[in-house]
Amino acid sequence: MERYTFDWDFGASGVGATGAGELLVIGVQGGKATGFLAVRVTTVDKQIYGIAIPDGAFIEVPGQGFARLADSYSAGAQVSLSAVSNYLTVPFRNFIVVPALAYQQAVTSQSVAKLLSVESSTNLSAQGKQQLAADIASIPKENTAIVPLPVQPVHLGSQTYFQPQKTQVADLLTKWWGVDPSKVAQVTRVILYNGAGIPGIAGEAAQQLIPCRPAGRRHEERRQLQLHADAGRSPARQRPAGQRHRQGYSASGKSRASPPTRASPTSS
């Protein structure tokens, strides 16, 4: 039985105050993400902060479990937004996609001034893009600080992953965003179970739900949803009850035993 876990981020109290905005810059080459830059622009303090996240950062990706952050982009920029927001506990709602070369130049030169002019995709409105460009232009270049996400390389066979270092990351978030990740509770976690026997249906359902971000929610909530498609099957195609839930998959992809059950949506 397939099991997909993803998170809805409703925003952290005190983040995104007047005069500050968050933006996720995604560097892309050949249709694949090569790097992510979490940017905070604050016109009050006249500062631009950025955390460069490598494509191999190993974090929880909505709908995919723990994976390389680059894999999130294959499901869309919205999934990348959710993954970064949930990990950093900062609500990133806007993104721009730029060429990998422009991304690298921005990180190396410590300047995001040219990124908006080379974006190939964004969810910013024309007015929002214009306002952001004006805000960036009003901040002196020397007031921009971009640092790499503190990570520890992990080698698995021929693959190299980067495990974020929680303590150092928490220090950056406290200093630049005023957020203490250990005290932020803004995520609703939804678990989808596929009890229908149709491969991939839970993943498809998860991808449809991920972009939905209800507004105005600040409380922590945990829901478990179980999908069953047997009701729409003919009797000849329905499996015996004892065979419907033989095996499940955790968010990490490992199989686990799963007892027969038919649960309706619950909240706790």
Image: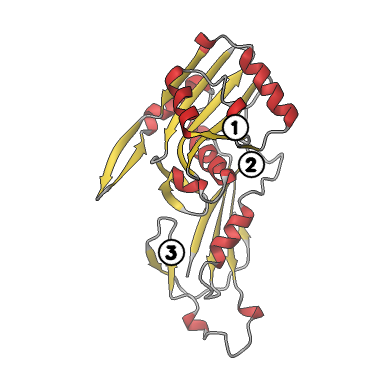
Q: Quadrant of residue 258?
A: bottom left
Which amino acid type is shown beneath numbered disc 3?
Tyr
Can you tell which of label 2 and label 1 is closer to the viewer? Answer: 1
Can you tell which of label 3 and label 1 is closer to the viewer? Answer: 1
Q: Which residue is mark 3?
A: 249
C-alpha separation, residue under disc 3 versus residue under disc 1 = 38 Å
Q: Which residue is mark 1?
A: 119
C-alpha separation, residue under disc 2 versus residue under disc 1 = 35 Å
The label on residue 219 is 2
Asked whether 144 or 237 is in front, the reply is 144
The label on residue 139 is none
The tally of labels here is 3
Q: Secondary structure at mark 3?
A: strand
Closer to the chain start, of discs 2 and 1, is: 1
Relative to 106, is 92 on the left or the right?
Answer: right
Relative to 199, is 42 on the left or the right?
Answer: right
At x 63%, y 36%, the residue is 93
Which amino acid type is shown beneath numbered disc 1?
Glu
Q: Residues within 10 Å of mark 1 (few under 14, many from 20)?
A: some
Q: Quadrant of residue 184?
A: top right
Asked whether 191 or 210 is in front, the reply is 210
The answer, for residue 173, to whether it is visible in the render is no
Which amino acid type is shown beneath numbered disc 2?
His
